[in-house]
Amino acid sequence: MNLDPLNDLILDEATKGIPPGISARLLDVGSMGWNLMRGDVPLPAAVLRESALDHNSRWMQDFVAKRNAVIAPHVKTTMAPQIMERQLRDGAWGVTVATLHQLKVCRRFGIERIVLANQLVGRLELDALVAELSASPGLDFFMLVDSLEGVQAASEAVRRAGAKARPIQVLVERGYQGGRTGCRDNEKALAIARAAHAAPELKLCGVEAFEGLLKPKNGGPADAVAAFVDEIVALFHSCATEALFERSTPMVTAGGSSFYDIVVDGLAGTGAQVVTRSGCYVSHDSGIYQAEQQRILAATGEPVGLINALEIWTHVQSCPEPGLAILTAGKRDFGTDSGLPVPLLISRDGAMPETLGGCEVFASNDQHAYMRYPQTAAVKIGDRIGLGISHPCTTFDKWDVLLLVNDAYGITGAVKTYF
Amino acid sequence: MNLDPLNDLILDEATKGIPPGISARLLDVGSMGWNLMRGDVPLPAAVLRESALDHNSRWMQDFVAKRNAVIAPHVKTTMAPQIMERQLRDGAWGVTVATLHQLKVCRRFGIERIVLANQLVGRLELDALVAELSASPGLDFFMLVDSLEGVQAASEAVRRAGAKARPIQVLVERGYQGGRTGCRDNEKALAIARAAHAAPELKLCGVEAFEGLLKPKNGGPADAVAAFVDEIVALFHSCATEALFERSTPMVTAGGSSFYDIVVDGLAGTGAQVVTRSGCYVSHDSGIYQAEQQRILAATGEPVGLINALEIWTHVQSCPEPGLAILTAGKRDFGTDSGLPVPLLISRDGAMPETLGGCEVFASNDQHAYMRYPQTAAVKIGDRIGLGISHPCTTFDKWDVLLLVNDAYGITGAVKTYF
């Protein structure tokens, strides 16, 4: 991977979070001497605590390595090549993407192993993929098929490109009733696997599934995930028995950010290469994934867990009623799909932030958040409030640039995203 | 206004919606001969129907002109200078923004009249504003105050800049109990108005309010809005009686995208310059504002209304269960805060789209939507589906570039956003 495309990127006030009047190379932002608490950048601003990113990236590598698995982090979460580079440097096996656009961004930065965790459709899209494979002989690429139409469309794209086109490495996708994509049972999945094996334009390399949205059935969601993983294992063995896999060590990939512990345990005995795909672990959050983390730590006995790295900093704009503060950040600045942000910290007059207890964000508009605060919090107009968020994916995509900070909120860099 | 900063902007596949392998000036996208239905651009793609934009921009100008009001469209909706240019060309009096960042983007493109519909806080932010005023003698700028702290902070910023700094034109903000920012009653608002009038660094130019989030009390929301407008009128007269306004014709500004008809009617007799601020009218939608539009047409007797201009086009990626289609667009591509998108159109094999009846998007993830379809719809993998959306603001901000199309889905241009 190489970050050269960032070398010439100039940031200025047209980018949210960059100080007015500045024109600076992205790579020079860390040497400007800015500090968030001193008021050197306009709010709202999105910050990533570098120590937490470091910790999380290494924590997950240790977690999967101890369990004989690897990780191809789902980089749709951040779409930030600088964070991808950190993940790969720390040992990630490859990356996962959701779309052709995301794949092309990763290729621009020279990533050589990519799982597209979807069945690509559309003639232009498939032709572009085949062209990318031809142009990049070192690229180790995998995508999903969950239908005969998908197998056929991918095969035709390879045929359209002529005799020299490389076959597409595919994984048969297993889903579940009421879920998203993927074959609903192993019989259907096996039929797709046979078709992929039979197509000379495709190479069947393994089995894929996404368990992250499973709802509880009889027990908790963990039971439902474990039962689903059992079915994936059965599918894997059926394919192996029929010698459908065209890879020396076939792959099984599953595992979002909620249940990766259950996935790696359940797949451990298969003899497959086990590839997990969490995306949110690297920034973590203060919401849904923080809650999941408690279950994972309890289940695995890991002594420490992930640390929230992502904060949205905002001003108190108005205190129009007792106990009500209106903040200068809203749905344009943080995700709201999995819960509203959580007030974590308060800083006044440039002081280092203190924990902010008893406050709650209870509503948001495009550019504002509504925060209740207790008498004891003594919130004032102009105070800086640091918000934790829930679901990193829908907060990263609100920012063209996030700021890296050290533990004293000195700004050590700027992270560019490609959404 | 001038669009020169767009002249050198090069688009390529790192931008969502731009074809792979292309490198083109933004301004040349319209002459590439692309057509969405022919599959010349990758999906998902966001398109703006140019005929609808044209109609909506002129419709709103006519609407306010007939009622002796003007409009400063809230450009937070689109943050697209090319759309702002259209609005100003069609007669918009100025623009409205929500943040310093948005103000600076408008200034980059030479907009000379801007209402910042917030009370700016933060020393860096206020100093940047004062510097902008000094650097731009032709800029006619207004912002809000809703507290003595706000009056004081703005005054101090002007004093910090020294004797040559221009005073800041301010509007006192009236809110309502349970609402967002703004003084909760006229007594408080009058005190703030007096303070703004007394501060030599500020010029009190009028009264501001935002009624768009008012919830129904006794009657429908329309009654609550009308009652609130009465209070704004009373505040305006109180300020006028005390000769607090420092503008030859003082301004009253209110009116979001839901109740602008009630606002202009209620403010008509004041003698003030009436400035409305709808943002969403220019693209309109297929959700909340389409619903509001029915009330406005019924109330005003206008024979025609706004037309939806904004569509998200996506592929059917998978049909894993009878009647269930998984689409290749999700929360990264459309807003979900005011309702899920609405399937409007279907196109197969490059044909012009047909109306898609009986379908419903019932869930979405980051990169996918779940659509139910009836047996009669015969949806297939690879079909193109055109989605209408609810709440333009939270869809525009998912796109760095939207595509302009004619009525045959020929791509006539590309619109850059600055979020």
Image (cartoon, coloured by chain):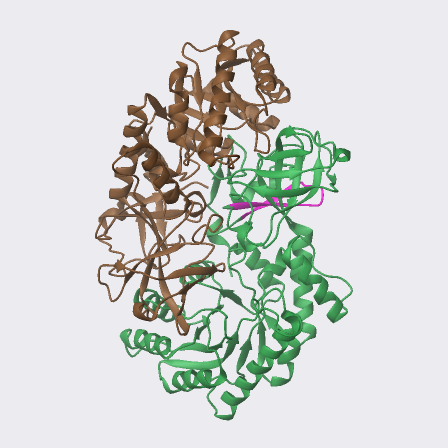
Chain colours: A brown, B green
The residue closer to the viewer here, B220 or A296, is A296
Is residue A166 among the parts visible in the rendering? no
Q: Nearer the viewer, residue B237 or A291?
A: A291
Q: Which residue is at 55% across, 37% downward? A: B368
Quarter of image, res A416: top left
Viewer-side residue, A49 vs A390: A390
Q: Residue at x 47, y 48 (%)?
A: A338
Q: Where does the image place residue B248, in percent across and percent down from the top left?
A: 51, 85
Residue A288, percent from left and from top: 42, 45
Q: Is residue A292 positioned above or below B116 on the image? A: above
Question: Residue B41, position in %: x, y?
Answer: 59, 35
Residue B350 visible in this rendered orientation of the protein:
yes
Q: Main secondary structure of the magenta part?
A: strand
Query: In screen coordinates, is B152 left or right of A32?
Result: right
A19 part of magenta stretch: no
Tag count in the figure? 0
Q: Nearest the camera: B301 or B228?
A: B228
Q: Is residue A132 above or below residue A279?
A: above
Quarter of the figure that contains the N terminus of chain A: top left
> Is-magenta flag for residue B412?
yes
Horizontal placement of A48 versus B228: left or right? Answer: left
Residue in the picture at 31% in, 60% down: A357
Q: Position of residue B308 (x, y in %)?
A: 67, 53
Residue at the front extreme? A218
Task: Read off the magenta span.
Answer: B401-415
